[in-house]
Image: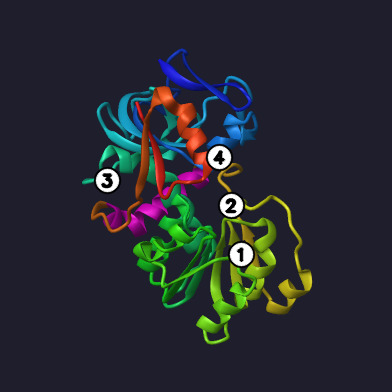
Amino acid sequence: MKAAVVAEPGRIEVRDIPTPEPGPDEILVKVKTAGLNRADLLVAMGHFHGARGGPGAVPGIECAGEVVRSGSATSPFKQGDQVMCSVSGGFCEYVVVNVARATTMPRGLDWRQAGTMQVALQTMHNAIVTAGGLKRGESVLILGASSGVGLMGMQIAKFMGAGFVIGASTNAGRRARLAEFGADLALDTTDANWPQMVKDTTGGKGVDLVIDMVSGGVINGAMQAAAILGRIVNVGRLGGMKGEFDYDLHALKRLTYVGVTFRTRSLEEVAEIIRRMRADLWPAVESGKLRLPISDVYPLEKAGEALAHMKANQHFGKIVLEM
């Protein structure tokens, strides 16, 4: 089969590699589409993301496709089933997926949408509802809101009953479009006054829940913008892995600060996250109420170009590979 392989740090080659065989708890999926994520850039640069990385690695953490065969007669999936998956190494024609990481593709979704939604849906439902404990009527601030995961997060927050949603983006063009995806207010975090703007908008209280995908230099601003007894869930680190942290402000606000990642979760935990997400969101996914814009589509042979396009950070929405 053909796969996009890390030939050396920063260089992707499409090569023929052996088609994998599914194990007892796995299915073999013929990939139709795969969505690009920031984690794929790390792998393409030769770094590890979880257990995957280095020369010879295949990027790709989400895809959609058809089940070819199962590794067990008791599998919940059968040949021909259309599935969405979170995977390890999805930029290829066939991939093996543990059944805990797969879910039946919703009716009415096309392949391009299906290949881009699994990571955003499970990540943001877990961050907002489970880790963040969103209650109906509460206010939510999403930092890094113009990313695919951020766009989905604003929609999920609204769908799950948030009273006021604020999205932050440093790009003026993208910021102007955040209202299409649920933002009641769009902010620019390069404006030093942005935490005060949040407090002014919330009557001086601050937001109940912050979903932070930026980290780096914005964490103290996030704590300033948060309400007393507010919650901050750290999902991503687009702005840097390290930064100053005002411990006294954290204590003064009595904030709950939670970090989340799928890299250290068991398969049982992932399966439960997907189950909860489906229970809350699946009717909205099937009806098209929750959606992501498709920015660009590339064939597998141009996976390197697709990753370069993502690295340039000029897109709005998801970049898709078609097999």
Q: Amino acid at mark 2?
A: Gly
Q: Is residue 293 magenta?
A: no
Q: Earlier in the sequence, mark 4 or mark 3?
A: 4
**Image quarter hosting the C terminus:** top left
Identify the residue shown where x is 21% and y is 46%: 108
Question: Is label 2 or label 3 in front?
Answer: 2
Q: Are marks 1 and 2 in contact (CB under 8 Å)?
A: no
**Taken as a whole, is the magenta stretch helix, strand or loop?**
helix
For disc 1, the marked residue is 190
Does residue 152 show up? yes
For disc 2, the marked residue is 236
C-alpha distance separating marks 4 and 3: 25 Å
Residue 233 in the image: state x and y as whole percent.
58, 61
- Per the rendered image, the range of residues in magenta is 268-285
For disc 3, the marked residue is 106
For disc 4, the marked residue is 39
